[in-house]
Image (cartoon, rainbow, N blue to C red):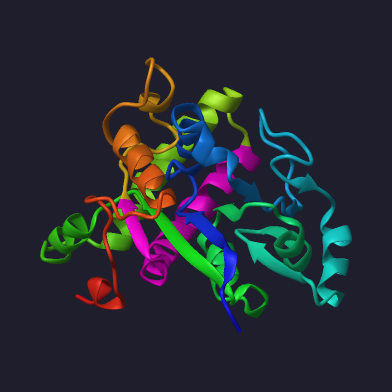
Amino acid sequence: MAKNSKRLIVLSGPSCAGKSPLLKAVGDLFPKLREQLVPCVFYNSRDARPGEEDGVDYHFRSREEIEHFRDKDDFVVMDVRGDLQAANIVEWRDEAEGDLFFEGNPFVGRALLEHPALENLEKVGMFLSPISKEEIRAIGVMENLELDDLVVTMMRRKLLRRTQRQKGLLGLPELEDIENRAGSAPRELRMACHFDHVIPNHDGEDSEHWWAFPLPLGDARRATLAVATLLRGEVPPIAEAWDEELFES
């Protein structure tokens, strides 16, 4: 069967890697590129975060309601870091008038890239990583330093800063959610080898480089330009290709 003229474009990475502000920056700097993307609005069992809008960012529904979608062939349903998510991907594929776009968790991103209902679409899988290939290799030869421990600590700090900025004082539910997300980061990082392009970015969602200045700075800017380049069908110099051997040490 011939390839569809639409593309499936996936932007994934660990929680707080910078996916959401990056997408906003692409829209601000390259509005025509952003306009061609048709997002898949997933159902999600978690509560909306500050600034999120029901029907735009997610369809926020109860876990019980989303569980019923498991019986429908057109839906993909996944448990993501304790949140239940689902989407009607056949409807999304057939009704979209542009490139299909997903931004979110790599478990869902990989499932979409490999789903048989989307097999005839050209695919662009992008993974936003809080650490580079060279840094992973450097950590691998250091004594008394485990990559997984470092990644959990790094993402915990990013998540704490982001959540404190959003909510102020944090209670037990917020702290438990942060631990859940940080603890999942090492597994998610290893999924980068299933994506076409890995974009190193040390400016997570906690970084003021996204919002404090007239334009993104540092890695925030480099990652934004890299994604814009990939959306144009070109490969930026900073994009990396990872394989499973990277994590063997």
Number of marks present in the image shown: 0
Q: Quick one: 181 or 195, which is closer to the camera? A: 195
Going 30% across and 26% down the picture, which residue do you hit? 217
Quadrant (top left, top right, bottom left, bottom right) of the N terminus: bottom right
Going 37% across and 21% down the picture, which residue do you hit? 215
Span colored in magenta? 172-199
105 displayed left or right of 186 = right
Residue 206 x, y percent position in the rendering: 43, 32
Q: Quick one: 122 or 131, which is closer to the camera? A: 122
Q: Is residue 117 above or below residue 189?
A: below
Pick out the residue farthest to the bottom.
1
171 displayed left or right of 217 = right
Residue 176 x, y percent position in the rendering: 58, 47
Is residue 12 one of those drawn in magenta?
no
Quadrant (top left, top right, bottom left, bottom right) of the C terminus: bottom left
Going 27% across and 72% down the picture, which residue do you hit? 247
Magenta region, main secondary structure: helix
Residue 29 x, y percent position in the rendering: 44, 28
Residue 140 x, y percent position in the rendering: 17, 66
Picture quadrant of residue 202: top left
Going 61% across and 39% down the picture, which residue do you hit? 174
Q: Is residue 200 above or below residue 21?
A: below
Is residue 174 one of those drawn in magenta?
yes
187 displayed left or right of 137 = right
